[in-house]
Image (spheres, grey):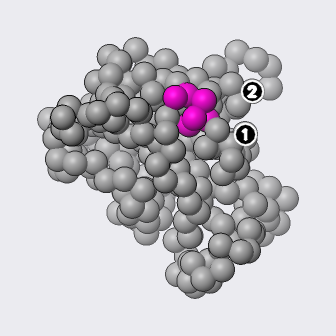
Amino acid sequence: MTDSAPGRIGRDFYDSSDYFESADLVDHESAFQRYRVAKVLEIHEPEPGDRVVDLGCGWGTFDFALADRVGEIVGVDFSERSIDLCREQLEAQPRTNVRFLCADAGETGLEGSSFDVALAADLFEHLYPDDSQRVAREAFRLLKPGGRFVTWTPHRGHILEILKNRDIILQRDVSHVDYKSMSTMKRLMTEAGFQVERAYYAESHLPLLRTVERMTQNFVPILRRRIAVLGQKPGDSPRAA
């Protein structure tokens, strides 16, 4: 994303910090990463043959998880460190239908109207408002008519996020520069041109907390862990036609 303004966390932060070194995040088979993949695919699962673009691909988790399920997947991240990590994994686990691109998720340079699905899992909390708008518009540009934009982001009002942002028990994540509310995510979708197809809160990966959240999140805001919103680009997809 743009990182020229003083005080903004941008590309340099991700390339020079230890952001990409967390063991739970590097390991695609960790409990947390398996949870992420499962819950994001509950929002919308791409079909065999789909072309998928993964915006803010980070560790390449979704790219490798979907490699055997889709026609092609392109992981995009503006961090050279992220893309280097993903390409190293790709050398160790070759996939002919997976590639990685170091580019701004708001201006990828990829061909427009060429993807069936766009993913943005745990991306929007890292984006300033202007960049969020750019990414939503770019997802719309990249998708074919009828294509779907899958988004997944933490809910700031959850008790764990409240504690983290006060450095109580858990440490604040300084890279989470702008948490979005449910209404903000839906507005980003509609202003970019999408129709909101699904929008709901999802529970945590922690077993006991997950059970409590599932039972109470409809009426207890501090137990709404994740925001899931699915947008669809208007028009008939070639498959539907």
Q: Which mark is residue 8?
A: 2
Which residue is located at x 61 percent, y 35 percent?
188
Q: Residue 185 carries which label?
A: none
> Would you say residue 74 is visible in this rendering?
no
Q: Is residue 192 magenta?
A: yes
> Would you say residue 215 is visible in this rendering?
yes
Residue closer to the observer: 182 or 8? 182
Q: In this view, does 169 lie above or below 215?
A: above
- Amino acid type at image mark 1: Val
Q: Is residue 136 left or right of residue 238?
A: right
Point out residue 149 in the picture as x, y percentages from the top left corner: 43, 40
Q: Is residue 207 above or below residue 21?
A: below
Q: Is residue 10 left or right of residue 145?
A: right
- Amino acid type at image mark 2: Arg
Q: Is mark 2 on a helix, strand or loop?
A: loop
Closer to the chain start, of discs 1 and 2, is 2
Which residue is located at x 52 percent, y 29 percent?
193
> Quadrant where the C terminus lies?
top left
Splitting the image into 4 quarters, where does residue 184 fall? top right
Q: Residues within 10 Å of mark 2 (few under 14, many from 20)?
A: some
Q: Is residue 97 left or right of residue 232?
A: left
- Separation of residues labelled 1 and 2 (CA atoms): 9 Å
Q: Is residue 135 magenta?
A: no
Q: How crowded is mark 1: few (under 14 residues within 10 Å), some or many (20 or more)?
A: some
Q: Do the residues labelled 1 and 2 touch (CB within 8 Å)?
A: yes
Point out residue 142 in the picture as x, y percentages from the top left corner: 38, 24
Splitting the image into 4 quarters, where does residue 212 fall? bottom right
Q: Which mark is residue 177?
A: 1
Residues drawn in magenta: 188-193
Point out residue 165 in the picture as x, y percentages from the top left corner: 80, 56
Which residue is located at x 60 percent, y 29 percent?
191
